[in-house]
Image (cartoon, grey):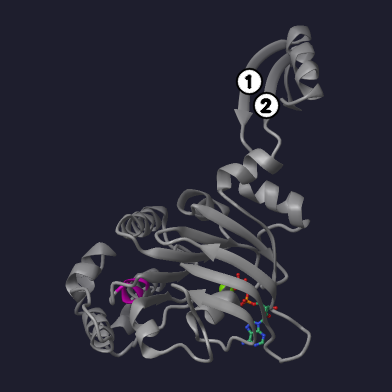
Amino acid sequence: MIEVKNIFYSYRKNDDYAVNDVSFNIAKGEVFGFLGPSGAGKTTTQGVLAGLLELQQGSVIIDGTSREGQPDKAFFNRIGMGFERPNVYKKLSGYDNLKFHASLYNRETEDPMTVLEMVGLADESKKKAGAYSKGMMQRLGFARSMINKPDIWFLDEPTMGLDPTTANSIKGIIRKKQKEGTTIFLSTHNMFVADELCDRVAFIVDGKIAAIDTPKNLKLKYGQPAVTIEYAEAGKLKSETLGMAGKDKEILQKFIAEHDVKTIHSGEPTLEEIFIKLTGRGLE
Ligand SMILES: Nc1ncnc2c1ncn2[C@@H]1O[C@H](COP(=O)(O)OP(=O)(O)OP(=O)(O)O)[C@@H](O)[C@H]1O
Ligand SMILES: [Mg+2]
């Protein structure tokens, strides 16, 4: 559905690239994640794909049609844009914000009240958005981004700064929209969000993609499963973490046989551990 080939983007139009030779494909109905630390180029890539930033180099093909210059109105009608910082009109109520945005689209839109209910703002629908808390504004921005029932939905840190319950309901909406066939490009520096929601994840750092795969494959391919053993020794509880594959297996078996083992916990590696392994950088 979306084919991105060798895109570059420089804000200064020199050889200082915020996006540096990035290629990937997204299938229809897929949640594709961009996971990377601050300044990696996530928002810039999203801007180029959505046509908010010029396509300086490389190609973006959507449904078989190559982007030439600025995207046309038909494209803007079918995409949803969730921004890092919610862009809502503070003088308008939550309801009027959505009503106004719905009026800008030349296609069937959601009922503002239905969407406000989905994000838990129904009771605050008449309140001016300027009086909303940060999290409420973010939810309104999220609601706004799906008002035109987008086929392609861009989400930039959709759960950042939200409490766990609200974050979960936002994740639920994303999953529901995916089931309905929406194709989703999601940027985040939160490995849990990427792991939970994304079918495939691209690791991005310094404008370059370091790996693309399903979260599961990334863990299987690059992670080393480990076990943490708590054991008693000289009246004290001690712990040791050991690998489970290859030669480590023998060491593990020997260790268990020779110690007074109290507990054993196995853990799969986190996406951040793999990210660090592949890029040398953390996600913060
Ligand atoms: N408007 C701008 N003008 C100049 N440089 C910019 C601009 N926006 C971003 N950059 C630079 O481009 C690079 C990529 O930034 P971008 O915002 O795409 O990263 P990001 O991965 O979205 O980071 P974050 O997680 O902090 O949102 C950074 O080096 C950043 O400083
Ligand atoms: Mg960003």
Residues 254 and 217: in front is: 217
- Name the residue furthest front: 64
Query: Circle 2: is it few (<14), some (14-19), or many (20+) Cα within 10 Å?
Result: some
Q: Which type of secondary structure does the marked residue at label 1 adopt?
A: strand
Residues 264 and 144: in front is: 144
Seen at 59% across and 65% down, the residue is 24
Span highlighted in magenta in the image: 142-146
Q: How many circles with numbers are drawn on the protein?
A: 2
| Amino acid type, residue under disc 2 in the picture | Val
Seen at 78% across and 8% down, the residue is 258
Image vertical order of residue 172 relative to residue 63, above or below: above
Image vertical order of residue 256 relative to residue 270, above or below: above
* Residue at the disc numbered 2: 227
* Residue at the disc numbered 1: 264
Q: How far apart are marks 2 and 1 (CA)?
A: 7 Å
Decide whether the magenta segment is chiefly helix, strand or loop.
helix
Seen at 75% across and 13% down, the residue is 253
Magenta stretch holds residue 251? no
Location of residue 112 by image quarter: bottom left
Contact between labelled residues 1 and 2, with CB atoms less than 8 Å apart: yes
Image vertical order of residue 91 relative to residue 157, above or below: below
Magenta stretch holds residue 144? yes
Residue 139 visible in the shown view: yes
